[in-house]
Image (spheres, grey):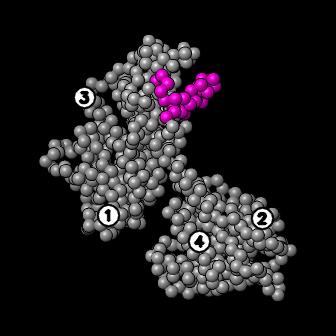
Amino acid sequence: MQTSGDQSPPHPIRRTGLDAKPDPAFDRFASIVQRTLGVPVALVSLVDDAQQVFPGACGLAEPWQQQRWTPLSHSFCQHVVTSAEPLVITDARTDPRAAGNLAVTELGVVGYAGMPLTDADGYVLGSLCAIDTSPRQWTTDELVLLADLAAACSDSLRLRIATLAAGDRLGTTGAAFDRSQLLLRASVALANTTTVADVVDSVRTLVTGTLDPDYVGVSLLSPDDHIELQSGATLPVQVAERWQRYQKATGTPSALAARTGRSVLLADLTAVAEQAPDAVSTFHEMGWQAGASMPLPGPDGPIGALTFAWKQPYPLDDAERTVLAALSGYVAQALLRADYLFSREQVATLLQQAMLSDLPETAPFELAARYAPATRGEHVGGDWYDVVRVTDNQFALVVGDVAGHDMRAAGRMGQLRSMLRAYLIDRQEPPSALLRRLDNAMRILDDHFPTTAVLAYVQPDRDGYRLQWANAGHPTPVLIERDGTVSPLTGRDMLLGVRHHTSRNDHTRTLPRGSTVLFYTDGLIETRTDVIDVRKRELHQVLRGLATAPLPDLLDETLSRLAGDNHEDDVALLALRVPH
């Protein structure tokens, strides 16, 4: 526990030089927390005796995002400072630790996870926190990742304090200042990396002009105890192939650092021959005369090595060794985060693919569908489409949208999709009745996440075919006739999961031969900047020119021209074409 008796004026956070103003380095930390954990809000919060300030903030509502400070009456982070421990809250509205805290009512804080930020003496200056506006069950992986990012953020704070102190003493040499700046730049650059290739490129750029090595390499330790080179693109092909993958026991600088967990410092070729004999021939081939390899620390031991080579003897001084050790820590955090993001993206992709069913055979009708995840976030979301054959001459079409575009939204979507499928198969009822059943099930299961959906039946009648549909707050489907006439299929009721005992209505329309019905989600036409009615007119204009195009072409062209390559929300499209 820390008390005011432990502090001496000025308050420790003053030594950081940070106040209620945005700082690019710490805004970047907040941004990476928001992006990797999928939370609405992330903060770098520093706490003194009267207030908390946010040099790093992402997603905070106004006026707080602009103001960058709150009194302690609005602070959860003060508890992290006083306890010097992480604070993890699932639902602040019911947690006694948050009783009376105005952040709940005025900032909308419900789920909270905060990790301590410390100076070199271990004093807790504040917290790196992830905030959700809904109850949140924080996973172990999420908390480990947040703690790792907090450690990197603490390193940046310590370097900032040391740099400012050195500047105040006016005793810092230009080289030492450059090294401090290198690490400050590294904290920003590496926080923005998302792949191993990004990490390698960033490190190479960072050390140019400061340490000036001829080669910067990253190698990772595989589960089967091999060293795998990640930076072969910068080496001659024959050298890269030679060291692409090899046994951990091999005598190279990278293998030695990864195997022992200690720094390998090779000031000249004599040191290379003594400590890394298997690398001597490559050093001669490349014209290198010195090297250094730093272990990349992981939660269960080294995950690999960061390696440098110079074309002249290069004995590292104490300051340079300290910088390389700190840089290897930054690199390790970035690599672990890249692996986490890659794994999360793979899981998200597989989850979305599993939830989007194959289209059944519906001859003589044609069917086509498309799904495009949001270009930001986890590449998975709550939009879905479905087609279910109900009887031999009748089938149902569904397009829906659960709020959000992350894995939680996809999970809720899967539950609703499965329930509606069961109702379609078990209950021979009109669309409005099935949507009422789904709404009631959401109420009983305490699922209050707003959801829109349109459910339609295609049935034969004496004039050919007719469409019967009910719409729960969803964007209006459109009918495209062969002559290019585009008509909205109007009639829309309250969305799902909002109000009990909502009245729902069925609507019917005869489908002209050769016509097309297009169902879509709001990501196709809604943006943050455009007027929605203008976007609807743009959609109708595009569809007029595609009235007789093959269905796959119609969907691809519509998606390309309306959503483009940088759409902010998920998009699902489902098209039905009536036989001629």
Q: Position of residue 415 (x, y in %)?
A: 54, 70
User: Which comes sooner in the sequence, label 2 or label 3?
Assistant: 3
Q: Quadrant of residue 525?
A: bottom right
Residue type at mark 2: give it.
Leu
Q: Quadrant of the C terminus?
A: bottom right
- The magenta span reads 225-254
Q: Which residue is mark 3?
A: 169
**Disc count in the image?**
4
Look at the picture and state if 165 lies above or below 90: above
User: Which comes sooner in the sequence, label 1 or label 2?
Assistant: 1
Report the residue at 60% width, 64% height from top: 355
Q: Which residue is mark 1?
A: 103
Residue type at mark 3: give it.
Arg
Left or right: 561 with respect to 156? Answer: right
User: Which comes sooner in the sequence, label 4 or label 1?
Assistant: 1
Question: Dot 2 surroundings within 10 Å: few (below 14), some, or many (20 or more)?
Answer: many
The residue lying toward the viewer, choosing from 279 and 43, is: 279
Q: In the orientation shown, which residue stands out farthest toward the right?
A: 580
Report the residue at 65% width, 68% height from top: 385
Real-space Cα separation, disc 4 to disc 3, in angstroms: 66 Å
Residue type at mark 1: give it.
Ala
Question: Dot 4 surroundings within 10 Å: few (below 14), some, or many (20 or more)?
Answer: many
The residue lying toward the viewer, choosing from 251 and 106, is: 251
Q: Which residue is mark 2?
A: 551
Q: Are marks 1 and 3 in contact (CB under 8 Å)?
A: no
Is residue 239 one of those drawn in magenta? Answer: yes
